[in-house]
Amino acid sequence: CIENKSKNAKSKYKVVASYNESSNSYVGTDPNISNKIVFDLIKNNKIVGLENLTKLKAEHKISKETRLDVYGEKEDNKYYIEVKTAPVKDEDTNKAIFPKGFRKKKSDPFSPRAIKHIDELIQLKKNSENNHCYLIFVVPRNDIVGFEPCNLDPLYCDKYNEAKENGINIIVFSTNINAEENTIIFDKFINIW
């Protein structure tokens, strides 16, 4: 595994991409890059349903404790967008999965914060028919065939399904990392299983 280090000394994430020799590709690891890519795609009207938004804002505070990654408006409609980075690939299915990581007990969710964000989106959606909520997963690799929530985290899977049932729009796309050109760009939209 070869790592590209962040050049930003203040960055929370010191490694922005790792080279995966088994798939001969780079895998992104910095969620701040995912947030920037989504913001730029929305700003440039590249995501269907999120075109021509005004008052675009990153890190939009919706409560004392919670910020969502992107906010925008169109006429009387408000758009709340949460971005999640899904770098982990299930080697058996070649699908990106989220969340996956450390947890103290097997019964704990991988990301209590991700569950909280879905709860916030569901509540915003219920508060007004003019609220449009999106959960966008950025898969910072291009060697996968689909996406699904991680079945090792039944709490997150249940919350993800609740989000779909409550009209939260879910979008998944991959990115392509070009180490020679030092770029990370949109690759393609991904099937959700």
Image (cartoon, grey):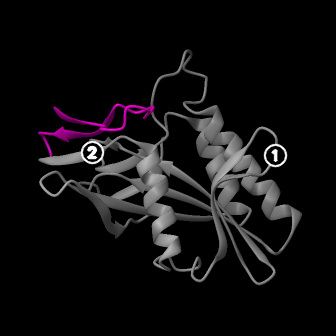
Are the residues flagged by discs 2 and 1 in contact, CB closer than 8 Å? Answer: no
What amino acid is found at the position of numbered circle 1 in the picture? Ser
Image position of 114 with respect to 38: above or below = above
Q: Is residue 169 left or right of residue 66?
A: left
The quadrant of the image that shows the C terminus is bottom left
Residue topped by disc 2: 27
Image quadrant where residue 191 sits = bottom left
Instruction: Look at the image and say whether residue 77 sits in the magenta stretch.
Output: no
Q: Residues within 10 Å of mark 2 (few under 14, many from 20)?
A: many
* Residue stretch rendered in magenta on the structure: 1-23
Circle 2 — which element? strand
Circle 1 — which element? loop
Q: Is residue 103 left or right of residue 30?
A: right
- Mark 2 vs mark 1: in front: 1
Image quadrant where residue 13 sits = top left
Q: Position of residue 54 (x, y in %)?
A: 66, 77
Q: Is residue 184 left or right of residue 73?
A: left
Q: Position of residue 122 (x, y in %)?
A: 76, 56
The residue positioned 76% from the left and 50% from the top of the image is 120
Q: Position of residue 145 (x, y in %)?
A: 30, 59
Q: 60 or 21, which lies in front?
A: 60
Q: How many marks?
A: 2
Residue topped by disc 1: 63
Label number found at residue 183:
none
Residue, far front: 9
